[in-house]
Image (cartoon, helix red, strand yellow):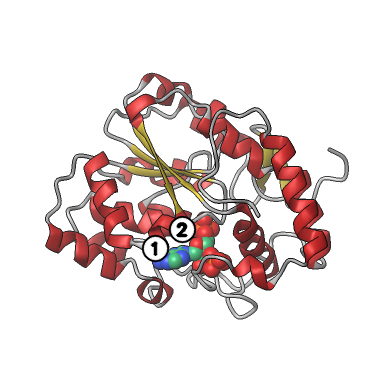
Amino acid sequence: MTDLPEWSLPLCGCLLTTMDFDTESIEYAKQFPVEDTDVFVATFPKSGTTWMQHILSLVLNGGDLTPINTIPNWDRVPWMGSKRLAEIADQLKSPRALATHLLFAKMPPSFHTSKAKVIYVMRNPKDILVSSYYFHQMATFLDDPGTFDEFIDKFLEGRVLFGKWTDHVKSWRRAKLGDRIMFITYEDMVQDLPASIRRISDFLCCNLSEEVIQNIAKCCSFKKMKTNPLSNFSLVSKEYMNNDKSPFLRKGTTGDWKNHFDSQQLTRFESVIHKELEGEDFSLPWSLE
Ligand code: A3P
């Protein structure tokens, strides 16, 4: 890839931000001792990572609100490979929750030999693109996204955070992790959050009561998270993230792509995604059309 964006560091088979990652933090991640009880949220950016970080913090703590009301999400559920992980790793209590945008193959060796579990959150790529377009406007450490039309090209070429969506999805869908991995969609979570939390609780063998599940769902609503400074990124200096330009918790809905793509753009987008997923033995949970 030529003309790399200024904010980017081409490492781990994709583009990382120099704000959060450097070669040392990636080296640290390679040596990171993953524990069997660790739980990872794996996502392509803008798929609902922050939401799942919030849910996991509650599910793994039996619905106790203390972590979500006292610790910012980036320290509660830190990102693999980030500079921050090295700083706070020894403060994490087992069972630890970690987030990753890395490709499956770039996870540390100890992850591959461990029994750590993974929740992979997928989202309709057209909504990811829209969310990312606004994120590029508010995240001032990234380049200006240009017009929506220009941003479609950037997205399809992988000149955005963590590269191509299709590479990410293929890498995790092909992972042979058996019952260590659970796939869920952002759309499932919007449609029925308590049912999604129940699935997560069962997957993690947390055995939560119906009352606790309902309480967790209330705490994880878009409205609640949008006003929680520990999950809405308002604690980050405006120099890096300007919530006035576009809030991090922006709309929290499905299908916003219908308000952004014209028919020519849709055809272009869909034909590239279809081509790149041709021959894969998994099907997407939503129609691309
Ligand atoms: P939108 O920009 O479409 O609103 P990530 O955390 O992976 O960067 O994803 C951010 C997207 O998840 C944003 O989407 C954000 O609003 C949405 N999101 C975060 N918390 C949510 C919640 N509780 N309910 C619904 N959507 C949520």
Residue 78 visible in the snapshot:
yes
**Kind of residue indicated by mark 2:** Glu
Which residue corresponds to the image point at 28% horizontal and 56% vertical from the top-left?
195
**In the rendered picture of this protein, how many numbered marks are placed on residues?**
2
Q: Amino acid at mark 1?
A: Gln
* Residue 197 picture location, percent across and down: 28, 54
Percent of width and height locating residue 239:
64, 70
| Camera-nearest residue between 148 and 238 | 148
Mark 2: C-beta under 8 Å from nearest atom of ligand 1: no
Residue pointed to by mark 1? 191
Q: Secondary structure at mark 2?
A: helix
| Left/right of residue 65 with respect to residue 126 in the rendered view | left
Give the quadrant of the C terminus.
Answer: bottom right
Where is mark 2, residue-wise?
Answer: 187
Q: Are marks 1 and 2 in contact (CB under 8 Å)?
A: yes
The answer for how far apart the CA atoms under marks 1 and 2 are is: 6 Å
Residue at image location 24% in from the left, 52% down from the top: 198
Element assignment for label 1:
helix
Evaluate whether residue 27 shows in this view. no
